[in-house]
Image (cartoon, coloured by chain):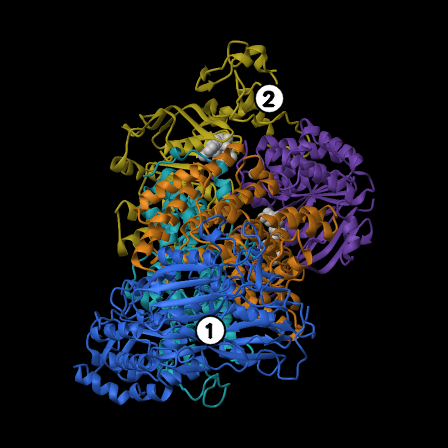
Amino acid sequence: MNPVLDVRDLRVEFPTAAGALGVVDGVSFDVGPGETVALVGESGSGKSVSSLAVLGLLGRGRIAGGSVSFRGEEIAGAGPERLRRLRGAEIAMVFQNPMSALDPLFSVGDQVVEAIRVHRPVGRAQARERAVELLREVGLPDPERRMRSYPHELSGGQQQRVGVAMALACDPELLIADEPTTALDVTVEAQILALMRRLQREHGAALLLITHDMSVVARMADRVVVMYAGQVVERGTVAEVLSAPTHPYTRALIGSVPTVHTGRDELLTVIPGSVPNPADVPDGCRFHPRCPQAVERCRTEVPPVVRTGEGRISRCWLAEDAGRVPAPTGAPGTGAR
Amino acid sequence: MTRYVLRRLAYGGVVMALVTALVFVLVRLVPGDAVTMQLAESGASPEQVAALRAEFGLDAPVWTQLGNWLAGVARGDLGRSFYGGGAPVTGLFLERVPVTVSLGLLAMLFATVAGIGLGVLAAVTRGSALDAAVRSFAVAFLSVPNFVVALLALTACAVWLNWSPPLAYRPLTEDPVNWIQQMAIPVIALGTAGMAGTARMARSSLLESLGSDYVRTVRAKGARERTVVGKHAARNSTIAVLTLLGLELATVLGGTVILEQMFGIPGTGQLIYSAVLERDYPVVVACTIFYAGLFVVTIIVIDLLYALVDPRIRTGRALS
Amino acid sequence: MTGPALFEAHDLVKHFRSRRGVVQAVNGVSLSIPRGRTVGLVGESGSGKSTVARLALRLLEPTSGTLSFDGADLGAASGAALRRLRRRMQIVFQDPNGSLNPRMTVLQAVGEPLVVHRMARGAALADRVVELLERVGLGARDLNRYAHQFSGGQAQRIGIARALATDPDLIVCDEAVSALDVSVQAQVLNLLRGLQAERGLSYLFIAHDLNVVRYMSDEVCVMYLGEIVERGDGDAVLRDPQHPYTRMLVSAVPDLATAGPAQEVTAVGEVPSPIDPPAGCRFHTRCPQAEAGCREERPALRRVVADRDVACLLAGGRTSGAVRP
Amino acid sequence: GGGSDEPVGDPRPGGSLVWQLPAEVSTDLNPLESSDPSATGLISGSVYGKLLDWRTGPDVTEMELEGDLAESWEVSEDGLTYTFHLRRDVTWHDVEPVNGRPFVADDVVATITAMKERGLQAYMLEAVRTVQAPDEHTVVLTLDRPFAPLLEYVAYHTFLMVPREGIEGRYDLDTVAIGTGPFLLAEHTPDVEWVLRRNPDYHVPDRPYLDEVRRPVINDTAATTAALRSGRLDVGTTSDVTVADEFRDGDHTVTETPGAPVSFYLNPRVEPFDDVRVRRAVSLAIDWEGMGETVRGSFNLTSILRPDVSDAALSEDEVREIRPFDPEQARRLLAEAGLPDGFATTLLVQRVDDEDVREAQWMQADLAEVGIDVTIETVDPGTGIERRRTHEFAMTKALRTVHLPDQTWRDFMPGYIENYALVDDPELVEGYARTRTTTDDAERRELHRAMQRRMETEIVQGLFPIQKFDYTIFSSRTRDLFPVPIHQGRRLADVWLSDQPASP
Amino acid sequence: MSAPATPARLRAVPGAVARFVRAQPLGGIALTVLTLFVLAGLLAPLVAPYDPLEQFRRDILDGPSARFLLGTDDLGRDVLSRSLHGARTSLLIGVVTTAVSLVLGTTIGVVSGYAGRGVDIVLQRVMDAVQAIPGIVLLLFIAVILGPSVRNTIIALTVVITPSFNRIARGETLRVREERYVEAARATGAGTGRILARHVLPNIVAPVFTLASLIFAGVVIAESALSFLGIGAPPPTPSWGLMLSEGVRYVERAPWLIVVPAVLLSLAVFSLNLLGDALRDHLDPRLQHATFAESRRWWRPRPPARLAPGLARAAEELDATDPTDRRPD
Ligand SMILES: Nc1ncnc2c1ncn2[C@@H]1O[C@H](COP(=O)(O)OP(=O)(O)OP(=O)(O)O)[C@@H](O)[C@H]1O
Ligand SMILES: Nc1ncnc2c1ncn2[C@@H]1O[C@H](COP(=O)(O)OP(=O)(O)OP(=O)(O)O)[C@@H](O)[C@H]1O
Ligand SMILES: [Mg+2]
Ligand SMILES: [Mg+2]
Ligand code: NI
């Protein structure tokens, strides 16, 4: 099956006073029809930028290389009008912070109606009907009344439901959700995730889900792409990556969250330091300064992208030298110690 | 919302009372009085001076005068002018209010429309030569006093176009062409500073909302740039611009004092200016109260406009 | 639970007056934090966790209820007495950068409590600050930098260093790790635990992440709409929730181990407004087991099994059949 | 005369003259109560008539009385009886409640009686004991004592004849003006414009020529200039010579009219002005002529009296002689007075025009040369008048709008409100009294001249050092608007507009 | 700001200026221009070719020439010399008025905003009343009552301007007092004085300074309007405003009389605006040291200086959280 979205070797730059700044460097992934692919990584690893690049919403930034193909069509260099027609209609997006993603001055109804009328030649009344239907579909209680509400009158969960409704307004083929639940409570998060899954099933859309939370990945995704400092460090099916991470970063990420099973006397896996500044990425493997397993080579040579299995890659010297990679031990979460 | 408006109105009342007391006392601290002025160098005898002073009630202590005046106000009588045969202040001044209000409104309108236009132009062409031009233009106009703008405009028209505004003010209803000709220069002179300020504010707040998350959402929906800028970004910048307009009102009202004087426009600005110089206390007090009232009301109106624009205020939830 | 409690709150109530009515933010919460222990507080947004934290430090005046700290009547203390008590209780906030004054250097920020309580000045102050910074993994070279020059995790460590400055006995952590990246969160959690082991600190640990709270706490309290609905040992509460709300929370927590869209979530409905909370059991509007009685009778927190208090009419003995489906 | 120098045709009737009114009439119009220059400028002579007036015309150089409402007049030998024979063809304006009835001696009696009793003109009638009308057209004033300035006062622009109805309050004199002049007061929009309309029943046949005189209120120089340029204004006035100069070579004619004298008072109660040598030093240290040339353009070097009004005024040479610009002498005087290093003082400047302030700066610079360090304090007229009246100043400078010699001397008589400089000089008082009683013109002139000399040399508390000029700018179509030293609205009856159309 | 000005701190000034100029080149240019103006003002007696009061009575209204570089005025005074000295008066009026009203207004605003309740209501009504009287009328009153002098001009302008600072300072205080770090400071036991001095004040200075730069410009302009009405700095003291208002009537005959002060005024105002923006950026440590990792959203256009007092007020009135909840300790 051809992927709906195929991102190859994407590079994104932002202009700064000190020249162009590459924040995404050679990112590749694809999303098949009806599939859910998760993009995970710490803050600043380039998840949002990668996904915004797909829609050409980079603002002052630009795609400096690579290709983005949507259903086989190259859209990386597409003109503004072509992109505009894609946005919302074919590729829709749900954003992280629902409060700030909705225009505070327009009623929820207006904003959903707008999403419909931008692409569909329907009358106002018809659009309203469809909007009510959408809001009902995303489980907003009393949608007729809610149409007249303003964003601030809704709870975070309700706002995000509106965001989802807008994204679904034109039955897009691909839905990009950029951390759609980080601002929400666990119970609400669970509701929204369940909703997205159900809608994805019903509408048959592909889903690119961006998150920093491995447990969300576990619950939602078919495949997972792990990013670090603007690069993909590991990619594979959820089961494989979570149970047998091949990149030390993935492993550390998994080990650093307490789970139901984490003993109270265990210490968590700590990744020392923090994500590097894109203006000043380390030589060699970008993760080496924080990597517990780093060897001399990691410090100087850029690791290649290694195929570690069917559809699996890892960007690590240790993975390349598979023989010497210590087999991932134990259940996730038991970490290094 | 109603309670809020009521509270504002109550505060407004307090402010007006303070203004009244302040002005009533201030105006009497000014050296000289209407009698000095009226009998200046006339050869009048001291008896004649004393008699006139008594006629105006100026021989009483300030507090008695204030008391008398307040008693009058309670009867809806703002007093009589010391000049022109003792015309009742209320009438004198009601005739002139529409003039000043229309002058002020036109100037504000000019400031707003031209300012927003320039600001939007600069914002959408950010970084271009046009943007730079608008911004320097704005600063230039912010640094030239309005009377200079007026004088230069007046002189330029007269010298190059052989044109000057009509001499006698006629209300809009009587002679619209005359009215427009008469108002044109003062409105422009009064409005340029405001226009420059508005342009700057419109530009920066538009840029701010263009960079916001909700605008990104609108773009992600596939909306046209026209919708993005004209509908969402513009409306979100309104608050900042409205606030600025509120502040500008004070400047514009102040400006009417000089410009009405220059252009012979019979508004309250001219009235208050000459009343201060002539020590026509009842008129000074009434006019100041009018200006203060206008200010207070505008502040309330602007607050209400905020509510109209921004549902977060309307429904009583504060902005963060 | 060993020894006399360091901090005790009894029947705290806090109502806010707002335009739209009275917000019943906290409604009869009792807490007891033993010395050297951690009490965790979980609950959804708006359930009143932060309000409890502020009440505990007397940053807010309780509408009613009593507070005591190390035997002293905290609720009645004022002036110098309050300041003395404040020295022994500190707080770490959720938003690490927001809780540091952007115009202050690390030296000024961390040194502020010392200056306020006249505990050090001049060179001694700098020395003490360096010592504190080193304890949280920063150092002397950071002294003259500003808060925003640090990553979230580092800023949170500065916040912790500030909290440690006066050598307090109790630290309230209000969502101290919620805003951090997972890797950084782990750093901070480990640091907090290390400090506790080292200095015998007590924590009131607030978070909305059940796993984190359980991991950190000796005892977990679950709040819903201003009330504590369940209290008990963290592991036990998570493994065997007694209150339907806790159960809902637990089911909503995704589990790494079970990959794939397998788990079904039982979370339903929205949290009602604290201005107009439901009568009877506050949870009945969302409770899958709610019965007629739940709508009228307001359940009190009661011991249902060993070491477990639950505020549910259906919990424990009474209609135990219905509790566990 | 006004208008351009090209040959002009005969006067033609019709048209509307637009003539700037530099300030709105702020007080009421009542001729008994108002001394407002803009009010008199508007109504005196044009709306209200006087018994006597001064002659105007292209060839008039001297102040010469002629009849207006009085055809002729006689003064008895002893100077105690004045008889006025009134014109018989005069009617009041046809306005309620006077309705165009004839003007009679009774109106004059009523007016003069009221003036004496309660008018601001009371001082002019000090010596008058009775006012009688032996017949419809004769009025006789009987005096206590000879009062030389009486006829001048009768011709003065505030000596306006009011119908008895007005005096008796049967209509409101404050707002309604019913006179005998060539124009009727037709319309008024406050602060905007006054309109005078032709009086069809005016007693001089075929006059006035103009249908209408519009007096728009314009007090801003730039606005006046612009309006003159664009042709919206026919006549404008300014005291600014640079403005006037800009019109000299165009479509306009500029006439220079002697105006108000600059007044300068020294307060003898403030040290060191208690010493006449210091006062004298000040007056000698200032280059008054330079000041007039620089700041005013055209001016007259004067002593106390106005040369344009009185032949008793000292001539420029005489002034130069008694008040030379002599800093050396000034320094000597200061040294004599024990102030060889000068002193510091203040100059209170009443500001009406920019010229007032420029003059002050000129004086300041000159005084600095002799070591007098002056701080200028500019104030608005209200403050200025009040402070002068209460003598709160060291030196003060303003303009003094008086015309007639008798009127002028009052300013220096003890007991008068306008005696700002606190002059209290028995010789002056005595001289003044004599000027009033002596009927001999030559003797009176000598008295005036002596008094001026005394003011300049012995008293030196009040000076009118120069007389400023006002500039009147006419459009080329304005004809026969002759300049006059004292306001005379009657001349408007002779003004006409050439057919050269005014610009829109 | 709030720290005592120890000698060490004074010594740090050049360094701070250098850092500022490096970080904000435009601000540096503006600062240079303004410094030149200030120097011109201070050193006017030394650098001016003539005494600004000296009247060259033969050279009235002469155009620019080698002798009088910028021409002479209507009393034959050298325009260049007057401009240089005028800088002194105008800047003095500008600086003192701005500084005094800044201190007054900010103090009132901070106290009012932080104290809340009755104090706030009373203080704000008084401020409203002062602001409700049109500035020009108030100026007219004060100038006429006190008489014209540089000092009285400053007093009059200060009265008129103080409410603006009050307003912005109060709005900012209302915002800042809800900030986490203020709560954190209260939690450490800091008293009100300390909170105001160390936490509130430093965090409201940026918008206050921005306003100050605008106000300064406004003051210089207002001074010219006062001069125009004859109630400003009394002649012959040269000030730009006075020169402008005196020169206006010679616009055809001697345009240099108006061009010179107008250009200087515009230049000063322009520089002040630039300086204000630059200072705001510079004083904000978040922007000052911005790097990618530290301030990830640096590319966002910054919000305009919080010129939304009305809004802030509306929001705060509507919010009406109970002030009794906050314990002022
Ligand atoms: N417009 C921009 N200009 C310059 N740098 C940018 C811009 N947008 C993003 N960046 C940089 O690109 C990097 C990646 O940012 P991105 O927003 O994609 O991270 P992310 O993985 O989505 O993080 P988060 O989890 O915080 O959303 C960051 O270092 C950020 O500073
Ligand atoms: N100052 C206040 N005025 C009015 N209402 C308030 C105030 N502070 C808190 N509240 C309300 O009290 C309730 C409890 O708030 P609180 O901040 O304690 O919740 P929380 O559990 O900490 O939530 P979160 O997880 O979002 O931090 C909320 O409904 C909140 O809106
Ligand atoms: Mg992101
Ligand atoms: Mg909270
Ligand atoms: Ni989370």
Residue D425 as seen in the image, left or right of residue B139: left
Colour of chain A in the rendered structure image: purple
Amino acid at circle 2: Arg
Colour of chain E in the rendered structure image: cyan
Is residue A297 at least partly visible in the picture?
no
Residue E215: x and y in percent read 45, 60
Report crowding for label 2: few under 14, some 14 to 19, many 20 or more residues within 10 A (C-alpha): some
> Residue most toward the top?
C318
- Work out whether residue A127 or residue D395 is closer to the camera in this orientation and state it: D395
Colour of chain D in the rendered structure image: blue
- Work out whether residue E41 or residue A55 is closer to the camera in this orientation and state it: E41
Report crowding for label 1: few under 14, some 14 to 19, many 20 or more residues within 10 A (C-alpha): many
Is residue B162 at least partly visible in the picture?
yes
* Residue at which label 2 appears: C286
- Label 1: state its secondary structure: helix
- Work out whether residue D186 or residue C102 is closer to the camera in this orientation and state it: D186
Q: Are marks 2 and 1 on the same chain?
A: no
* Residue at which label 1 appears: E246
> Residue most toward the front?
D134
Q: Which chain is orange?
A: B
